[in-house]
Amino acid sequence: MLNISDIMQTVNMIDHQHLDIRTITLGISLYDCADPDINRCAGKIYDKICRKAANLVNVGCEIEREYGIPIVNKRISVTPIALVAASCENGEYSIIGRSLDKAAKTCGVDFIGGYSALVHKGFTDADRKLIASIPETLSATDIVCSSVNVATTKAGINMDAVALMGKVIKKTAELTASNDGLGCAKLVIFANAVEDNPFMAGAFHGPGEPECAVNVGVSGPGVVWRALQDVKGESFDVVAETVKRTAFRITRMGQVVAHAASERLGVPFGIVDLSLAPTPAQGDSVARILEAMGLETCGTHGTTAALALLNDAVKKGGVMASGHVGGLSGAFIPVSEDEGMISAVKSGVLSLEKLEAMTCVCSVGLDMIAVPGSTSADTISAIIADEAAIGVINNKTTAVRIIPAPNKNVGDNVEFGGLLGNAPVMKVNSVGSSEFIARGGRIPAPIHSLRN
């Protein structure tokens, strides 16, 4: 039962601490849209998305008004298109990509995810066709997001896919050079991708999901930062308990919104994803939370330990607040979307190597990292391989969303706008990894994957 104090605390979190529902994401299965003719397939996809998501934006706006809770994005995720398009006997898969973009715009949503392939153990012909079409699709569309899963703890790392994705990222950057390589901001390479992630650019409606589902992503870095101001100098036991209690309150709000959206859309409730997803706004930074624990600047020694505490406490608090916490749920560290991370990079304290270490204990991975446009495809693939290895060995989701910014060098800045923010171009190790990437094949699954 909520009392007046609880209500006033929530109002204050919304008004002054950047608490929001980051996204209501409607997952839609497209299996029944498969067709030998790609144009008919694209037409079926457009029709089904428009039918199922017709009221999504209106419902989100209604809930915003009634509950007084900001809902920043309304989004759609769909079945990985490589699975749906496998039946198509003709045409380029970019036709389907454009259909996704058109349907999403018709519905009025902010993004649509699921132009995706799952290739952690190998490629189908459809996987290869879809991956080959990613650069063109992301350059020709505005709000379509793409992801490729190249590794799992059970299967190991598909190094042929890792090598291929380095080339795809480079091509995508080239085709969107006029926007600082913006297409790469809509492309994520995963290890251990989850099927119910509501956050872009990695969202897709997984093979194990129902016909439709509502997944809600909640975010409140500013709320956690403010809570830590009241426990300055206290022990880490107190810090952890404070984060847990705060995460509980944030998740309860997400639960209320998720059930309201589910009921009004007539769609099953999926999960609440409690991820501390920052924005470029002042006071909405994960980096500043870590600094509130006593670090002078995010990236200095102790940062990984502080992030580990934060991520664990967020999950513990969230799990107690909802029966269905899922997605990624933890702390995100996207450089371009976090003003504290941007500041730490510009000061020279936060490096790419330190960010990689931090991904061992956070929710995802190397996210929204800008690197020089001259960075080779092999080097990008090697960065992906390192991140995938962290995910596979630690049995967690990791990802890479990296932008080799065309015609940009270390110290330059790239501008994406909105929630994508801006990023300083970071230094990359100049020593090559081409022979390593050229080996191909699969890096085997670790021994602890044998759990059956």
Image: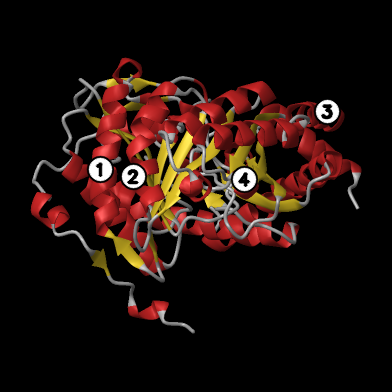
Q: Is label 2 or label 3 in front?
A: 3
Which residue is at the front of the view, 132 or 247? 132
Image disc number at residue 62: 3
Query: Can residue 265 be seen from the camera position used here?
Result: yes
> Residue 357, how many percent across, how many down?
32, 54
Which residue is at the front of the view, 141 or 309? 141
The disc, 2 or 1, on the residue closer to the chain's N-terminal end is 1
Quarter location, residue 42:
top right
Q: How far apart are marks 2 and 3 (CA)?
A: 41 Å
Image disc number at residue 299: 2
The disc, 2 or 4, on the residue closer to the chain's N-terminal end is 4
* Residue that appears at 53% across and 25% down: 281
Quarter location, residue 393:
bottom left
Q: What element carries label 3?
A: helix
Image disc number at residue 156: none
* Residue that appears at 80% across and 45% down: 262
User: Which residue is the site of mark 1?
Assistant: 166
Q: How far apart are marks 2 and 4 (CA)?
A: 43 Å
> Residue 162, how many percent across, how many down?
27, 52
Q: How far apart are marks 2 and 1 (CA)?
A: 26 Å
Q: Is label 2 or label 1 in front?
A: 1
- Specify the amino acid type for callout 3: Glu
User: Which residue is the site of mark 4?
Assistant: 30
Q: Check the image and report above or below for 93 versus 419.
A: below
The disc, 2 or 3, on the residue closer to the chain's N-terminal end is 3
* Residue that appears at 58% across and 23% down: 102
**Label 3: how many Cα within 10 Å (few below 14, some 14–19, many 20+):** some
Contact between labelled residues 4 and 1, with CB atoms less than 8 Å apart: no
Q: Is label 4 or label 3 in front?
A: 4
Q: Distance between the residues labelled 1 and 4?
A: 28 Å
- Specify the amino acid type for callout 4: Leu
Contact between labelled residues 3 and 1, with CB atoms less than 8 Å apart: no
